[in-house]
Image (spheres, rainbow, N blue to C red):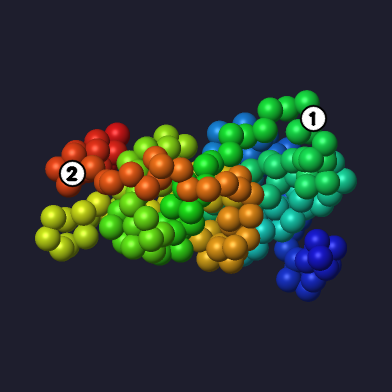
Amino acid sequence: MIHDVLNSSDAASLPLPDEQILRLTEAMIFSGTAPVSTRSILNFLLEHDLIPSGTEDVGSFVNTLMVMLQARYADHGMYPVEVAGGWQFRTAPDIAPLLTKILPRPRRLARAAMETLAIIAYHQPCTRAEIEEIRGVSLNPNVLDALIEESLIAPRGRKEVPGRPVLWGTTPDFLRHFGLKALSELPRREELMMDIPDGPVSREETSPPRAQAETDKQAEGAETA
């Protein structure tokens, strides 16, 4: 596919990025603590006057740049991938399982947290009451706390109904965690729920929710964090 893009008629009519541009873009993505957007790469090239003169379609130039960078890392242990609205280096899929023997595995979310996260992802923005209605059990506040702590969800305003409950939605970290470019790439809910521990619902998960005033206080703290 990369070969086809580079040999298309559109790419052939564009000046190709030189080695300096490739190395600078590589370093920019590698040193970033978050995915680097295509717009940021373009702005960097424009700011440093690195776009070849006579380039009419700078967007296509940057797209070609990223295709070339992906081709460079095609057989490496890591490669640039588009995720959460930007570019980031990720471990090659065929190597990642081997690294679990020498690197600690990320902490897995409990079943209640994964179920709650899946509901928020597919129904956002949604309130706690709506989450409880879909799950069919009361939602322990510790579940929301855990998702907030992992930066997977955040407040998205308040619903204009009596009590004005907090609306919850996913974050860019959610997209990075699951390797998604955008929410439009969400898999089926069953696929999202595959990597969760099996087991019965705990007493903590089905405990009665806190009083409304205390719940609002918790949400207000999350909004101002």
Which residue: 68% across, 41% down?
89
Q: Residue at x 81, y 65 (%)?
A: 1
Q: Residue at x 58, y 55 (%)?
A: 193
Where's residue 145, x and y in %?
37, 38
Say what amino acid the circle numbered 2 marks.
Ala
Query: What residue is shown with label 2?
Result: 211
Q: Nearer the viewer, residue 14 or 209?
A: 209
* Residue depicted at 46% across the width and 43% down the height: 202
Answer whether residue 129 is visible to the viewer in this image.
yes
Marking on residue 101 = 1
Residue type (three-letter) at the residue carrying disc 1: Lys
Q: Residue furthest left?
A: 162
In-image side of 5 versus 112 (left or right): right
Task: Calculate the distance from the C-alpha at mark 2 to the C-alpha at mark 1.
Answer: 45 Å
From the viewer's perspective, tell me whether residue 139 is left or right of residue 162: right
Q: Secondary structure at mark 2?
A: loop
